[in-house]
Amino acid sequence: MVVKLLLYLLTISSFSILFGCTAIPLDPPTSTNEPLYDKLEEVSSPVQRVPIAVYSFTDMTGQRKPGDGMALISMAVTQGAHVWLLQSLKRAGGGEWFMVVERIGLENLLKERQIIRQTRETHGDKETLKPLLFAGVLVEGGIVGYDTNTHTGGMGARLLGIGKQGEFRKDRVSIGLRLISVGTGEILLAVSTEKTILSTRMSSTVFRFLDMGTKLLEIEAGYTENESVSYAVRKAIDKAVLDMIDMGAEQGLWEFKEVKVQVLPTEPEVNFGTSNSAENKTMRLEDNQNKEIEQ
């Protein structure tokens, strides 16, 4: 009877561990970077929009995805980081900060304008195209670093054939931005940011001997969760754009709109002393008039 009770308790404990109901605290560390989407949208508006252009924003690390014993052909980080940069610039302050002009697909844009000119000349249309907007500043930079296994660790526990263990790994991606003046070629700002990429692995194991130790039952379950590298790159770019706006305001490159604070009118103070003196004067006049009538 006692053996059956112990087996029953072991079975219940194993299922509780497998479905996450165990009391053993093995929670992996979480990433400390908060999403910056709302912060970038809610940044204060500038006095004037800044015309800006991006020609390239590439992967400068050259790293390949790690494989089992060899590197894969695919790159470790995204090759389309310029898309995230353009979106971050357009989202800043709800679209009121930067006037982003097209330069990455400039060749296609010029071809299309040439087709429009030739078509209009063929049909005798003398209407001319508006000139392209020019940018006052350029944004250069890229993904400058991708470090793997910057922090690793884990923890595990086992009791009576029932165990649970967890492992974590931290990678890091680095972004660099430069703001360059078109008129002088001077580098106005240089910003660099980092974002942590967290990967976790949790597993539970249960084994038990059956039939007087002649048979072994073993159950194992687990899961792995890897934070997206593209998501980390996007968040690092958002942080870099926020830092660029703040540093530019500190150096006087642009200014925030002044927030007008409406001052509510204050209630007039009541001078009780003046009121009392007026009442006293009125009472004295009434007393004098009464005395004159009695006389």
Image (cartoon, rainbow, N blue to C red):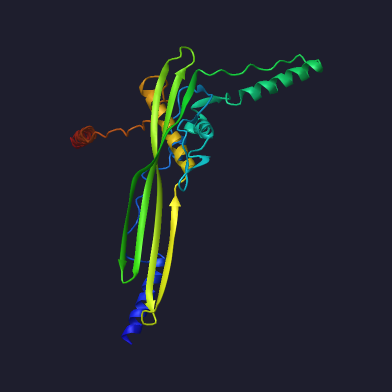
Q: Is residue 12 left or right of residue 85?
A: left
Q: Residue furthest right?
A: 123
Residue at image x 23%, y 36%? 272
Rendered residue at 30%/32% (across/down): 268
Residue 42 x/y as whole percent: 45, 35
Say whether residue 78 is left or right of residue 107: left
Q: Quadrant of residue 258?
A: top left
The N terminus: image quadrant: bottom left
Left or right of 121: which side holds 83?
left
Q: Farthest residue in the bottom direction?
A: 1
Q: How many marks?
A: 0
Q: Is residue 184 shown above or below 81?
A: above
Say which of 6 and 259 sits in front.
6
Q: Is residue 186 above or below residue 295?
A: above
Depth order, front residue of 235/2: 2
Residue 37 in percent (x, y) is at 46, 39
Lateral position of residue 229 relative to residue 118, left or right: left
